[in-house]
Image: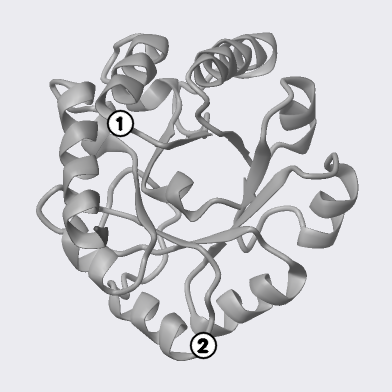
Amino acid sequence: MNRDWLSVYLVMGSVDCNGRDPRDVLQEAISGGITFFQFREKGTGAKVGMEKRKLARELREICKRHNIPFIVNDDIDLALEVKADGVHIGQEDTSFSVVEERLAPGMIIGVSCHTVEEAAAAVDDGADYIGVGPMYFTSTKKDIREVKGPEVISEIRKAGLTVPIVGIGGITVENAEEVLEAGANGVAVISAISKAESAKEAAADFSHIHNIVKN
């Protein structure tokens, strides 16, 4: 897959938008320069059933219009139903082999990793990219693992793994540069964009940092 897709990776569901319409937030973020989108509808007050599927379809259409890859967080049925570009799974989610078997050929599979060993296993399985974190403390995800920081990305690169990496967890405009310099191809962000006063400006700031570090 194209590593540049991971440059500014927005992860978002309706509960992450401070009461705003997630469709508007996504549109703004795309205008600001996000390059990848993961639909993650989890947490207190998250939509379920028909409402969740309707929102997924609407966000998928917005991404499609702007050629932004649309990934679904650990819901293979939903990903297939809305013709998503792929699925992202965690260490405790559906096993890689099951996901790979059920997805259509060519669909992207991303895997959350927290250690060099997990990263190596994901690469052996055939992951298209890995999400490594948490980089910093975050209150967005309640099931947060131990914070290891950008050093774990450096360790993965030193181990010779060339898989595309996106850093995630507590990343802000102030610390994104450290994550990219450690060897990540991009940064995955939730609240720093979805809860920003202007999602467009926040996304543009992350895009600017990425361009400075990587170009």
Residue at image location 90% in from the left, 51% down from the top: 101
Q: Nearer the viewer, residue 25 or 65?
A: 65
Q: CA distance from mark 2 to mark 1?
A: 30 Å
> Can I make out residue 143 in this image?
yes
Element type at mark 1: loop
Question: In the picture, residue 152 is in which quadrant?
Answer: bottom left
Q: Count every numbered label the image shows and give the total.
A: 2
* Residue at the extreme bottom: 159
As drawn, 109 above or below 32: below
Q: Please, what is the three-letter code of the amino acid marked with disc 2?
A: Gly
Q: Nearer the viewer, residue 156 or 75?
A: 156
Look at mark 1 in the image and give the residue it sits on.
33
**Is 44 on the left or on the right of 79, as rendered?**
left
Q: Mark number for residue 160?
A: 2
**Is 186 on the left or on the right of 121, as rendered?**
left
As drawn, 175 above or below 182: above
> Can I make out residue 136 in this image?
no
Give residue 198's position: percent from left, percent from top.
Answer: 16, 21
Q: Nearer the viewer, residue 13 or 26?
A: 26
Q: Nearer the viewer, residue 153 or 68?
A: 68
Residue at image location 53% in from the left, 14% down from the top: 65
Give residue 2's position: percent from left, percent from top.
Answer: 54, 51
Crowd band around label 2 with a 10 angstrom C-alpha radius: few (<14), some (14–19), many (20+): few
Which of disc 1 and disc 2 is earlier in sequence? 1
Element type at mark 2: loop
